[in-house]
């Protein structure tokens, strides 16, 4: 069946925030598909719309944000047509989410066990308390928390940051969701813990066959865990490719810039990092042409006039840049 | 926990002693005497002072108070009902019980209505319902109790004649309605305001987003996750209020002619009835101290992060 090949299909999704100053197009027409068992990274700088896009998938957009266009299909069902009650039932059950700051994401006045069990009981009213508790302990063990049967009755403030994130992951996976959205899950953790959490997510992903949308601004993390990557800039996906393609053959100037601004292990230690000059565009007044144009080293006249279409570079590698249209480039040079 | 409570009781006794001391010396710094009237001669005053031991040095007088209080003796009234034991004035004829009863019901009404109102306002932030509640609570906090009580009397007792004017002894439930509304309205509005503010803070916390992502219902979200986290300021406020509200309100009691405790607080000060001033201060401070202890224990129950005593372990 053609329509069930992909777990999630996002087509031309548009999300806007209606502020007193005007409409801010935080996500401006993005499309991608996510297969079963696939891990996709969404990379981009702060404000590029990567979190907003993820929240809009499961109806967690905060006011005054609104989905203004496009479609989101999950296993053939139109998510945007869901009623609030259907969406609530869907959230945490088929799709769950883990967040950036584990220190503040758990409710301080309830025990870890209580919060884990709640994820079960709010989707299955008939489940027995002992059953839910046993499942909670099992999940805590699964995410590598020692002495889980004792830990389950502790409060979040008795857990360290890394352990809280483990507990968050346990909570997100307790209903065996098909899709896990991870919104910068390692950003607030120190590097050793980061590595442990990534390792854990990788192994759980294989064990539970969960697809993951992994949102981050850390390209190192992407390389570690993802199969495919979408690079977002100012509400657009500018480049999408497999991890290998993206790291070894980045095509979009923005992606190249991102990679050049990362420290490398194989550098001789005297190389300077190259920042991307300029600042992100004002989403209230987006430029007429390519969003990245004003900051792009290779900017051409056409870049400031028209938005670039995606160029298919083979093997699912797409990039939205006028540079890929070589004939055009020559034409410009000849002028 | 038990050790903590014992320590707190010890500290409370010291606090009470200090309060009594400060009240005693302040009271004696105020000019006037319980026996001073237009007709009284210096000889009469000296005689009365000698009778009640007011001629002794202040420190000796204070010592006598403390010793008597330790023996459960609050002394006799010097002026208001000369010779009557203060204990009878405060606790006799069910006055204290009446004030407590009226106060507790009003408090309950304030809490039971105030907290949900605050939640509703916070949940509907910026909508007309929130706007309406905000205006109402602001008016409720701003309007003096005697104005509200008088307005209620004028409307429901005099004009519409639905409710009795004089409550008197508070025998039928109908007689309770207006005193309770007047007494609780201010507190209800204040609690609603407090709840709204801390609820708004709680609603924007990350753990609320986590709970939503888990798929909990809106009701659970508000009642279980947000409300419990926003109760601390309300509890803090309730401690002293409980003591104040159950010892009666002078204004309400005189407006509705309720024979409660409140009026004695005011009268005793005006008439320099030293023993009654000391006793009422003692009773009120004890209540405040006890309620504060309850508040601290309630904190611990509401928020597990709070440890009752850092020196405990």
Image (cartoon, rainbow, N blue to C red):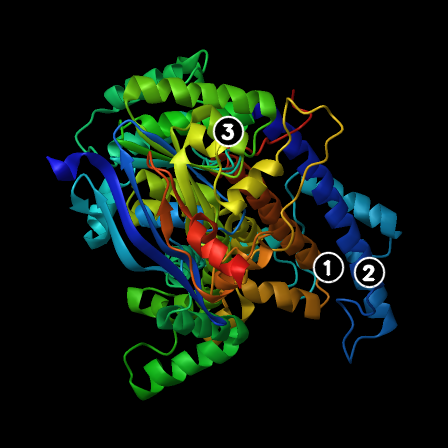
- Residue found at x 54% / y 51%: B233
**Are tags 2 and 1 found on a single chain?**
yes
Labels 3, 2: front one: 3
For the C terminus of chain B, the quadrant is top right
Instruction: Say which mark, if any, is on residue A266.
Output: none
- Residue found at x 43% / y 73%: B136
Labels 3, 1: front one: 3
Label whose residue precedes the other's in the sequence (2 or 1): 2
* Residue A53 picture location, percent across and down: 38, 49
How far apart are labels 3 and 1 at the CA level? 76 Å
Left or right of residue B120, residue B68 in this image: right
For the N terminus of chain B, the quadrant is top right
**B94, A209: nearer the viewer:** A209
How far apart are labels 2 and 1 at the CA level? 9 Å
Instruction: Please state the chain letter of the residue tagged with numbered disc 3 in the rendered image.
Output: A
* Residue B169 picture location, percent across and down: 39, 66
Instruction: Say which mark, if any, is on residue A221.
Output: 3
* Residue B132 picture location, percent across and down: 39, 73
Rendered image quadrant of residue B144: bottom right
**A142, B97: nearer the viewer:** A142
* Residue A219 picture location, percent across and down: 52, 33
**Looking at the image, can residue A155 be seen?**
no
**B167, B191: nearer the viewer:** B191
The residue positioned farthest toward the front in the image shown: A334
Which residue, given by chain and number where applicable, does mark 2 sit on?
A: B28
Which residue, given by chain and number where applicable, does mark 1 sit on?
A: B274
The residue positioned farthest toward the right in the image shown: B57
State yes or no: discs 2 and 1 in contact (Cβ < 8 Å).
yes
A121 is higher (above) or lower (below) than B270 = above
Left or right of residue A322, residue A270 in this image: right
The residue positioned farthest toward the left in the image shown: A1
């Amino acid at each position: 069946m053609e329509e069930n090949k992909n777990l999630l299909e996002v087509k031309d999704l548009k999300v806007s925030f209606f502020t007193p100053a005007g409409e801010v197009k935080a996500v401006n027409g993005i499309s991608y598909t996510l297969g079963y068992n696939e891990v996709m990274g969404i990379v981009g700088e702060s404000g590029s719309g990567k979190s907003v896009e993820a929240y809009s998938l499961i109806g967690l957009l905060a006011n005054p944000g609104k989905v203004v266009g496009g479609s989101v299909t999950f296993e053939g069902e139109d998510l945007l047509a869901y009623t609030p009650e259907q969406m609530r039932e869907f959230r945490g059950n088929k799709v769950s989410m883990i967040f950036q700051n584990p220190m503040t994401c758990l409710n301080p006045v309830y025990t870890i066990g209580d919060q884990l069990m709640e994820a079960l009981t709010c989707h299955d009213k008939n489940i027995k308390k002992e059953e839910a508790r046993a499942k909670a302990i099992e999940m805590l063990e699964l995410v590598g928390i020692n002495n889980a049967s004792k830990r389950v009755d502790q409060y979040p403030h008795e857990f360290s940051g890394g352990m809280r994130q483990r507990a968050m992951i346990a909570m997100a996976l307790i209903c065996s969701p098909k899709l896990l959205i991870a919104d910068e899950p390692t950003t607030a953790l120190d590097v050793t813990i980061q590595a442990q959490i990534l390792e854990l997510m990788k192994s759980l992903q294989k064990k539970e066959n969960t697809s993951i949308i992994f949102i981050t601004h850390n390209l190192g993390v992407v390389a570690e865990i993802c199969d495919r990557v979408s690079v977002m800039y100012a509400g657009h996906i500018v480049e999408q490719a497999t991890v290998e393609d993206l790291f070894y053959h980045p095509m979009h100037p923005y992606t190249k810039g991102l990679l050049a601004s990362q420290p490398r292990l194989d550098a001789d230690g005297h190389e300077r990092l190259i920042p991307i000059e300029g600042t992100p565009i004002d989403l209230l007044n987006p430029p007429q042409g390519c969003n990245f144009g004003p900051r792009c080293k290779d900017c051409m006249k056409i870049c400031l006039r028209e938005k670039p279409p995606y160029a298919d570079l083979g093997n699912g590698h797409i990039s939205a840049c006028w540079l890929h249209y070589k004939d055009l480039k020559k034409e410009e040079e000849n002028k | 926990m038990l050790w903590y409570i014992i320590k707190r009781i010890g500290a409370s006794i010291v606090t009470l002693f200090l309060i009594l001391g400060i009240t005693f010396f302040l009271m004696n710094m105020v000019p006037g005497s319980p026996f001073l009237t237009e007709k009284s001669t210096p000889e009469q005053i000296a005689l009365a002072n000698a009778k009640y031991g007011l001629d002794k040095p202040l420190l000796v007088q204070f010592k006598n108070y403390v010793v008597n209080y330790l023996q459960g003796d609050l002394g006799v009234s010097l002026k208001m009902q000369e010779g009557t034991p203060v204990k009878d004035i405060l606790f006799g004829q069910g006055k204290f019980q009446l004030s407590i009863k009226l106060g507790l019901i009003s408090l309950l009404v304030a809490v039971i209505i105030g907290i949900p109102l605050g939640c509703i306002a916070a949940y509907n932030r910026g909508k007309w319902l929130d706007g309406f509640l905000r205006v109402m609570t602001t008016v409720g906090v701003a309007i003096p109790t005697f104005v509200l009580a008088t307005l209620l009397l004028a409307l429901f007792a005099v004009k519409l004649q639905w409710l009795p004017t004089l409550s008197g002894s508070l025998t039928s439930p109908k007689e309770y309605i207006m005193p309770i509304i007047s007494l609780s309205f201010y507190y209800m509005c204040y609690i609603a305001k407090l709840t709204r503010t801390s609820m708004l803070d709680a609603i924007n916390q990350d753990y609320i987003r986590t709970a939503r992502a888990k798929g909990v219902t809106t009701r659970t979200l508000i009642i279980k996750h947000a409300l419990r986290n926003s109760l601390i300021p309300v509890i803090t406020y309730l401690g002293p209020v409980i003591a104040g509200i159950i010892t009666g309100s002078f204004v309400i009691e005189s407006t509705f002619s309720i024979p409660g405790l409140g009026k004695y607080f005011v009268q005793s000060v005006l008439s320099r009835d030293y023993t009654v001033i000391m006793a009422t201060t003692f009773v009120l401070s004890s209540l405040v101290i006890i309620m504060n202890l309850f508040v601290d224990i309630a904190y611990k129950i509401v928020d597990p992060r709070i440890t009752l005593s850092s020196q405990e372990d």
